[in-house]
């Protein structure tokens, strides 16, 4: 488990076994929306966010992603669970353009048929 402190950007957080969400209601919304829109019908275990590196964070024009695995899909979702970007990944490192995305907090989800990595970043 990982711990970021009492809050993220001044917003109280709840800490779960897999990811951190701003509050329990937001957590339930994201879980429900992801399950409804999931590419997988079965459970895919979540690896802690520390295994996917994102920088810079907070970001402005693009974000660099370093992954421990290749051959998967990266999704960027807003905190309401809406997918704002979908990209196939075949390398351990990639840049993601943030052009057209509003300032705020986003989730980056990398997944394949066996694993899923989740991390957060902020657009200034």
Image: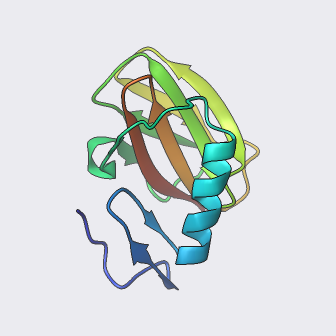
The answer to whether residue 60 is above or below residue 64 is below
Residue 61 is left or right of residue 113, and the answer is: right
- The residue sitting at the front extreme is 42
Q: How many marks are shown on the rendered structure?
A: 0
How is the model colour-coded?
Answer: rainbow
Q: Give the x, y percent position of residue 118.
A: 43, 47
**Residue 88 versus residue 97: which sits nearer the camera?**
88
Residue visible at 55% across and 66% down? 27
**Residue 7 appearing in the image:** yes
**Residue 58 versus residue 70: which sits nearer the camera?**
70
The answer to whether residue 73 is above or below residue 50 is above
**Residue 6 versus residue 92: which sits nearer the camera?**
6
The answer to whether residue 46 is above or below residue 92 is below
Q: Quadrant of the C terminus?
A: bottom right
**Residue 23 appearing in the image:** no
Residue visible at 33% across and 41% down? 52
Q: Quadrant of the N terminus?
A: bottom left
Residue visible at 52% across and 25% down? 73
Q: Give the x, y percent position of residue 83.
A: 69, 43
| Among the 4 quarters of the image, the one containing residue 29 | bottom right
| Among the 4 quarters of the image, the one containing residue 19 | bottom left
Residue 124 is left or right of residue 21, and the answer is: right
Residue visible at 27% across and 42% down? 51
Q: Give the x, y percent position of residue 25.
A: 61, 75
Q: Give the x, y percent position of residue 23.
A: 53, 77
Residue 58 is left or right of residue 82, and the answer is: left
């Amino acid at each position: 488990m990982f711990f970021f402190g009492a809050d993220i950007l001044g917003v109280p957080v709840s800490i779960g076994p897999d990811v951190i969400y701003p509050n329990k209601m937001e957590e339930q919304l994201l879980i429900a929306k992801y399950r409804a829109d999931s590419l997988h019908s079965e459970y895919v275990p979540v690896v802690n966010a520390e295994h996917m590196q994102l920088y810079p964070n907070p970001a402005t024009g693009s974000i660099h992603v370093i992954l421990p695995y290749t051959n998967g899909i990266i999704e960027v979702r807003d905190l309401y669970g809406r997918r704002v970007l979908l990209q196939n990944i075949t390398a351990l490192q990639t840049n993601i353009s943030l052009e057209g995305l509003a300032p705020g907090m986003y989730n980056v989800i990398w997944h394949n048929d066996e694993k899923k990595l989740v991390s957060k970043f902020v657009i200034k």
